[in-house]
Image (cartoon, grey):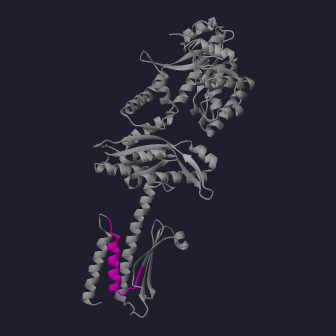
Amino acid sequence: MYKDKLSEYYVLLEKLVNSMTRLEGFLLDSVSSNLAELCKLLRISKGVTEFYNSIEHEQAGKGEVFVCYDNGKKSKEVLSRRLLTKSMTVAKCKVYMADGDEPLDEEELEKVDLIMRTTLSFISRNRLQNVVERLTFYDDAGYRNLRAFMRQLSMLNENGNLGGHTAVHFNLKHFSLINQEIGRAAGDIAMRNYFTLLEQAVEDKGVVCRVGGDNFVAVFRTEILDSVLEILKGAPVVYDVNEGKRIRISANTGVFIMPDGFTIDRPGDIMDRINSSSQAAKNGGKDSIVYYSEKMAVNKKKAMRIQQLFPIGLAKEEFKVFYQPKIDIETGDIAGAEALCRWLHDGRIVPPMEFIPVLEQNTDICKLDFYMLDHVCRDIRRWLDEGRKVVRVSVNLSRKHMMDVDLLEHIMEIIDRNNVPHRYIEIELTETTTDVEFRDLKRVVSGLQQSGICTSVDDFGMGYSSLNLIREIPWNVLKVDKSFLPVDEDDDKSTRSIMFKYVVAMAKELGLECIAEGVETENQVEVLKNNRCVFAQGFYFDRPLPIDDFEQRLDKHHYDIGSEHIVS
């Protein structure tokens, strides 16, 4: 090469390397321009680069092709280079010369080869960054993941821009049922289309990411909060394009609006807030959107304190069994009792609503349930040994037990270890919220029936599929939730009165023992009598009683129906 041409080559090569290695990121136009100048200098008529994510993609021709220079002349390939990286991606570079042009000499070939190897190295490094980005910040299904969310929070915090942003955590409602109804493949399409709706609402004002399963997080400018919440409240999405089939998807959502000047020590501080409010939304009945408040932080500290104290309280037997009598309203006799838990700590009774929901967040509630069953069995065994007239006692079990494949064995071990006849124990289970839990519930109830253990369905009418529940599962007792029990202001034509009448009639026709919960007035007792609902439980007769008081009731064994029995 001539000296001036060689100098020009090194100047252009230096510019190319500089454009490829800028610390703040390369500029594609600059890289392309420098490559084109080098092609012209070395009489190359066309330069082409290719990139494939795998050898299989290379063989199938599924990759990215970039023409860095083409003067439009008819040409033929003169040199080709291929690079297989350790991550098994493939990069290729090919150069062409126009027909009739003087061939490259050995020195020129070396110069072209150096440019090609430099380009391949650049492509591999650049694409590797994209691969790392994809593997690090996207999950296997192609959704941005939790790391992407945390990175966005960190970047906003670093730049002092968290103020004016809102973070949300949302869980798709009943998505296991959606998968069951339309199939998992269609469910995946529906989820993706719902996610796309949210991404379109957020655009470049934030990010939407999947935490896992049907749980998601997002952070975006507060100015678009209303439009995002409209989608989270519920939106129809297509899951079958060919037939235009759609399904409505909504979410339980926790919201944290970040005020101006807001900063964090770590991104987890925001996750804690939106997780707390999302959990409140999930457990809050009608409130599917819950905004974070400082009260939640206080409640979380209380919850952590309860979780710390629970094993100590269990070891010290601070949890006491209180018994609420069940009454036969035709005779006034005690027909049974429900065992309810009270926590006596530091000289005061901790209300169940302060600790039961906390223990239900993990398997601690199962430990408490077994503790309660064991103490009830101890009491029944002692009453039998003392010659008392014993009644059947119901013990509540949380839904959390449904994941225990050995639940039946655990229940029977406790009862039989205490040498309690099976007829004196009733296991009370709450209605399920999903069909998956329903199958487990059916298995457990059937197993208890075979062992001679009485079973009851608590809060009938409040769960997943009430009619299916009593059609498919062999219960002994149906406990009618107090929301169905008519109040004094209801007449015979009220919705509550009609529903209560037919629930009781249905239970009796099915051969189920029916008991009404939450009986508080003499008028309600009359309603029960008029509808032939024989058994009742509620404050009209007695509140849950400590064991000494209950034993006195048990010994007396009778209530005078018609006089006031509310215990203050």
Picture quadrant of residue 41 = bottom left
Q: Residue at x 34, y 85 (%)?
A: 40
**Residue at image point 40% right, 74% down:** 120
> Is 31 placed above or below 167 here?
below
Q: Position of residue 311 (x, y in %)?
A: 47, 26
Q: Report the magenta stretch's main SS.
A: helix
Place of residue 118 in the rendered image (x, y in percent of width and height, measured from the top left): 36, 75
Above or below 299: residue 97: below
Q: Is residue 138 visible?
A: yes
| Relative side of 163 to 501, left or right | left
**Count of marks, rendered view:** 0
What is the x, y in percent for residue 554?
A: 62, 9
Left or right position of 512 against 74: right
Q: As displayed, is residue 143 above or below residue 522?
A: below
Please tell me which residue is depicted at 35% across the width and 78% down the height of the picture: 35
x then y, percent, for residue 146: 43, 49
| Relative height, residue 137 to residue 342 (above, below) | below
Q: Where on the picture, by quarter, is residue 350?
A: top left
Q: Quadrant of the N terminus?
A: bottom left
Where is residue 119, by image quadrant? bottom left
Is 252 in front, or is 215?
252
Question: Which stretch did the figure color magenta?
Answer: 25-47
Left or right: 431 as drawn, with respect to 223: right
Camera-side residue: 229 or 87? Answer: 229
Q: Is residue 75 magenta?
A: no
Q: Nearer the viewer, residue 156 or 528?
A: 528
